Amino acid sequence: MASLDDGSIHRRDQARSVNPIAWRIAQMNERVRSAKEQDLYLYLQPAEAVDGAYVTINGRRMLQFASYAYLNLLGHPRIRAAAQSALDEFGPGTHGVRVLAGTTRLHVDLERKIAEFKQAEAAMVLSSGYVTNLGVIAALLGRNDVVISDKLNHASIVDGCLLSRSKFVRFDHNDMADLEKALAEVPGRSGKLVVADAVFSMDGDIIDLPEVIRLCRKYDAMLMIDEAHSLGVLGETGHGILEHFGLEDGDGIDIKMGTLSKTIPAVGGYVAGRSDLITYLKHSTRAFIFSAALPPPAVAAAIAGFEVIEAEPERIKKLQSNVDYFIKGLQERGFNTLKSETPIVPIIAGSDERAWLMAKIAQEQDIFVMPIVSPAVPAGTSRLRANVMVGHSLENIEQAMDVFESAGKEVGVLPS
Ligand SMILES: Cc1ncc(COP(=O)(O)O)c(C=O)c1O
């Protein structure tokens, strides 16, 4: 039992008497302050310049290994020109929601382009990928439905499932037997939605799509796949996960979701699918109906982004060869990169402290990479998440791997 003078009772009583909201704010501020004090706070660093494979922060030009610019399209002249001309024609915003005064011909063109690119009948764009998952899952499901979600799905999917107020079931990561068990347990009359990332955003591995499709058909479930990290990345021509698995008839995924903020150098999210689905969503997704339309320059940049992916397939080929080179090189140096086979490459460090320290050492040696720590990933699997891009030369990749190796040795991730 605690003695009166060890301070614990006093602290507990103090915690109880404090407003819980104020307590939460204070806790977070304390964590941030402590990280800053130890010089380990690496978040929210403002870039002063972004050029191709490099980023300049605090006057240091570093090799970029933390971006989602997989095909390095940000500076593409065709995309810049499209954004500029939309700015000249329509201005920087729309002053309206899509259903009322916010739709321009560019929005219609973008939705048509996405539908064509994703081999779907129609598409809908929203203000971000996060909002798309939130809004679409909530619009589709009701209290008596069941949503079945991979345990490593992105936070926006999890939040969409919670917002839907349907029964939320999670299956073990990429474990098809566990998915089947979950499907078999759903009561007969409930609506069923299975949802998964195509490429998992922390581990870089790929969902077993052919098996997921087979199970969804067997149990009459709808399937939603988030292609945030597979658009422009997977498949020989970058059309995504169906192309990757040779399922090019476009069938099997009912709700094809993706973002316009990763390979596509703009902002926004989309869903593509049958036209009756999209009509339903355009008239029932609150995040679409009650939120402003995407800015025209972003819409025009997105259209041009899809066109460039189709016009320059050599970018995808080179990206895929950079991915192979990077993963093989890291594994040869002794790193655990989990089951990644995509540009998202986890370099497992173990504890949060090791991940923070490795990232800091790497940044001091001009490699901009970020740590991912618990609770974003399970405790003990904290990591660097190193994203490789088409703009990296083999020399750039070698340079980064040398830095990761020396940092890994310094913090004890690799034997020294
Ligand atoms: C798998 C996945 N889905 C959705 C999102 C959200 O997309 P956005 O950044 O466009 O809001 C992300 C963002 O990182 C993601 O990784």
Image: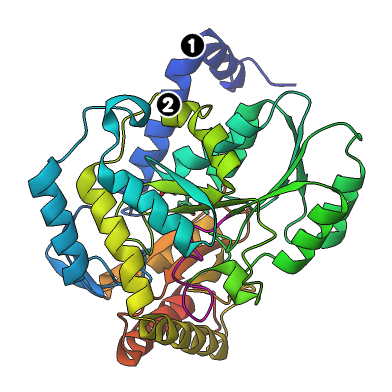
The front one of 214 and 250 is 250
Q: Is residue 27 visible?
A: no
Q: Is residue 23 above or below residue 106?
A: above
Looking at the image, which residue sits at the far left? 88
**Amino acid tagged 2:** Ile
In the drawing, what numbered circle is on residue 18? 1
Task: Give the extent of the magenta segment.
Answer: 226-238
- Residue at 48% across, 54% down: 258
Q: Which residue is mark 2?
A: 289
**How is the protein colored in the picture?**
rainbow
Question: CA–CA distance between discs 1 and 2?
Answer: 40 Å
**Residue 49 shown left or right of residue 224 in the figure:** left
- Residue at 47% across, 24% down: 24
- Residue at 42% across, 81% down: 319
Q: Could you tell me residue 132's position as x and y percent?
A: 48, 41
The N terminus lies in which quarter of the figure? top right
- Quarter of the rendering containing residue 261: bottom left
* Label 2 SS: helix
Which callout, 1 or 2, points to the residue nearer the camera?
2
**Residue 410 shown left or right of residue 51 in the figure:** right
Question: Which callout, 1 or 2, points at the residue further toward the start of the chain?
Answer: 1
Q: Could you tell me residue 325's position as x and y percent?
A: 47, 89
